[in-house]
Amino acid sequence: GAVVSQHPSWVICKSGTSVKIECRSLDFQATTMFWYRQFPKQSLMLMATSNEGSKATYEQGVEKDKFLINHASLTLSTLTVTSAHPEDSSFYICSARDLTRDRAIRGSTDTQYFGPGTRLTVL
Amino acid sequence: GQNIDQPTEMTATEGAIVQINCTYQTSGFNGLFWYQQHAGEAPTFLSYNVLDGLEEKGRFSSFLSRSKGYSYLLLKELQMKDSASYLCAVRGALDSWGKLQFGAGTQVVVTP
């Protein structure tokens, strides 16, 4: 259980265009989803936290108007990179957790389950 | 400030043991996680510590000392497929979202 998918797995786009990345929890309801960005040989940097049905909370330094996050249902969150530029090229990873399940299970590790990532290249 | 430190790279031979250390300074502490990440792939969960002591899961063990802000991941009987980056992540102040802060990762290279 606890499978998270992302689509697309890779995308190449021209500078100035917008790109939408989907993150889906396949076998559980994700009350909370996280979006990370990872540059080569660097660690994951949290961009934002989204809870179903509410606005995303962005980390300091992340432009909310550039990285639009929508968590419209308990199984789907989307990240839209608007007016993408070459410096936005990165590996974008989502993760999800089921808070309700985690709190209900005694000894739960309360872990996050990661999607396979999306490689974005902006030309 | 918040800081999570781990070595950049470690090399070991197949069948050997490697210990990856992680030290952290975070505002609040609510658990420490270890993840394995192969190149170009997403991280996969390895272990979780919230209380002091050793947690063992097969070939992998993780240790935590909260008073020292220190953890290590022990990989035993190394296999070639264990070549990957190992990420230490700390969940900070108690909140309802479970945000994690990641270290930069330790690249483990297993040689024949």
Image: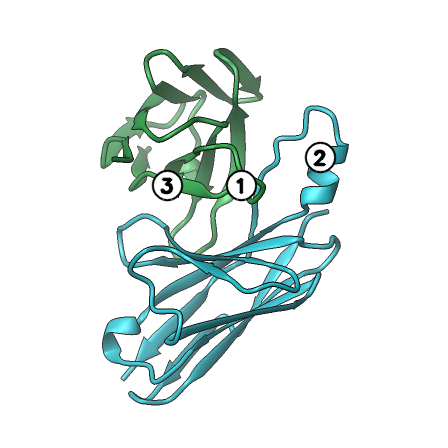
Give the chain letter at badge 2: A
| Amino acid at circle 3 | Phe
* Secondary element type, mark 1: loop
Residue B102's disc is 3
| Amino acid at circle 1 | Gly
In the displayed orientation, state which residue is furthest to the front.
Answer: A54
Q: CA distance from mark 2 to mark 3?
A: 23 Å
* Secondary element type, mark 3: strand
In which quadrant of the rendered view does residue B56 lie?
A: top right
Give the percent coordinates (x, y) of residue A121: 33, 76
What's the residue at 74%, 53% (across, down)? A28
Give the percent coordinates (x, y) of residue A49: 50, 55
User: Which chain does the green colour mark?
Assistant: B
Residue A103's disc is 2
| Amino acid at circle 2 | Arg
Give the percent coordinates (x, y) of residue A24: 64, 64
What's the residue at 30%, 39% (across, down)? B107
What's the residue at 55%, 57% (across, down)? A115
Give the chain letter at badge 1: B
Crowd around label 1: few <14 · some 14–19 · many ≥20 (10 Å) = many
Residue bearing mark 1: B98
1 vs 3, front mark: 1
User: Which chain does the cyan colour mark?
Assistant: A
Residue A33's disc is none
Report whether residue A82 is seen. Answer: yes
